[in-house]
Image (tube, rainbow, N blue to C red):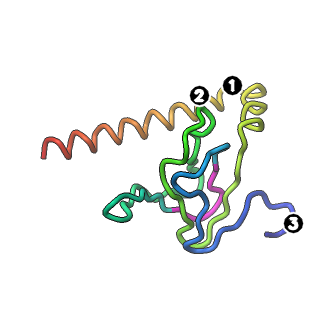
Amino acid sequence: MRDRELGQVYEDGQTIVRQGDPGDGMFVILAGEVEVVRLGPGGETPLSTMKAGDIFGEMALFGKEPRSATVRAKGEARVLSVDKRGFMKRVHQDPSLAFDILRRMSARIRTLDEEVARIRNP
């Protein structure tokens, strides 16, 4: 990582978070892409590909559940980690940040609802 650049650089295929691990913060993709996969009895199920500007792991800010998926770099990716304390400090400075996180979570829930409906009603 070059001086004065934020975040950590992950190489292609490198794990950023692992399903089942404890979560204590969220991540912001600053550059590149990441892939989100869920591990199950039948192997890996790809869930999504995320790009610069996207966030993941935000559920860890609101609860103590383990990570629900594994996230890996897809090519080289620069990712900034934000712990709960840092997030709360920023929210006190700019409450619209919390609204933005909730808006993004709501959009993901809506997408998941549509996918479940499509699977149940082909």
Residue at the outermost front position: 41
Residue 25 higher or lower than 43, as above or below: above
Q: Residue 92's spot in the image, x, y percent? A: 76, 25
Q: Residue 66's spot in the image, x, y percent? A: 55, 45
Q: Which residue is mark 1?
A: 95
The secondary structure type at the circle numbered 1 is loop
Residue 18 higher or lower than 115, as above or below: below
Q: Which residue is mark 3?
A: 3
Tell me if 41 is positioned left or right of 32 in this view. left
Residue 106 higher or lower than 66, as above or below: above
Quarter occupied by residue 17: bottom right
Nearer to us in this view, 115 or 17: 17
Residue at 46%, 59% (x, y): give it: 49
Residue 82 higher or lower than 113, as above or below: below
Tell me if 67 is positioned left or right of 83 in this view. left
The secondary structure type at the circle numbered 2 is helix
Q: What amino acid type is highlighted by mark number 2?
A: Phe
Q: CA distance from mark 3 to mark 1?
A: 30 Å
The secondary structure type at the circle numbered 3 is loop
Residue at 56%, 58% (x, y): give it: 18
Disc with the residue nearer the chain's start (2 vs 3): 3
The quarter of the rendered structure image containing the N terminus is bottom right
Q: Are marks 3 and 1 in contact (CB under 8 Å)?
A: no
Magenta-colored span = 27-34
Residue at the outermost left position: 122
Q: Which residue is mark 2?
A: 99
